[in-house]
């Protein structure tokens, strides 16, 4: 009985570890992809930025995002609550 419980626990942990890895891969694909994104940011409910990135959008823990703005080809950072919508992958 003790051996069966141990095997069950080990299998459960292995499945959990695999799920975390898949989740991290999906998050990294969405976050660190080289696809352009439409970006809209707000501060206190007021829209402060609306534009498009040329490629990857980088995030930091403080809520700041950084990207190359497609309108002027400049490296841009924005603070605030931002919605980042990536373009569909090309086939």
Image (cartoon, rainbow, N blue to C red):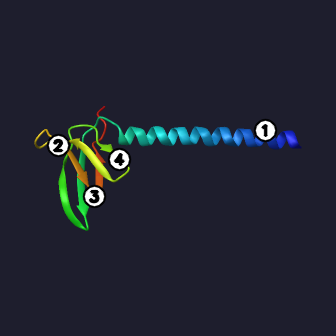
Q: CA distance from mark 1 to mark 4?
A: 40 Å
Question: Along the polypeptide, which appears first: circle 1 or circle 4?
Answer: 1
Residue that numbered label 3 is attached to: 80
Separation (CA) of disc 2 from disc 1: 53 Å
Q: Nearer the viewer, mark 2 or mark 1?
A: 2
Residue tagged 1: 7
- Badge 2: few (under 14), some or many (20 or more) residues near its Cα, within 10 Å? many
* First of labels 4, 2 by sequence position: 4
Quarter of the rendering occupied by the N terminus: top right
Please name whichever residue, 24 or 65, is drawn nearer the observer in this view of the structure. Answer: 65
The residue indicated by pointer 4 is 60
Question: Which is nearer the eye, 72 or 5?
Answer: 72
Q: Is residue 5 left or right of residue 61?
A: right
Distance in Å between CA atoms under marks 4 and 3: 12 Å
Task: Tell me if 40 is positioned left or right of 30 in this view.
Answer: left
Residue neighbourhood size for the residue with mark 1, other residues' Cα within 10 Å, grouped as few (<14), some (14–19), many (≥20): few
Q: Which residue is mark 2?
A: 69
Q: Kindly indicate whether the residue at mark 3 contacts the one at mark 4 (C-beta within 8 angstroms).
A: no
- Mark 4 or 2, closer to the camera: 4
Per the model, the C-alpha gap separating discs 3 and 1 is 48 Å
């Amino acid at each position: 009985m003790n051996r069966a419980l141990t095997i069950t626990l080990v299998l459960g942990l292995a499945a959990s570890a695999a799920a975390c890895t898949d989740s991290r891969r999906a998050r990294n694909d969405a976050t660190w992809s080289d696809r352009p994104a439409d970006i809209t940011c707000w501060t206190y409910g007021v829209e402060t930025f609306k534009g498009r990135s040329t490629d990857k959008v980088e995030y930091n823990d403080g809520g700041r995002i950084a990207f190359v703005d497609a309108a002027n080809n400049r490296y841009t950072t924005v603070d605030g609550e931002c919605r980042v919508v990536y373009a569909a992958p090309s086939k």
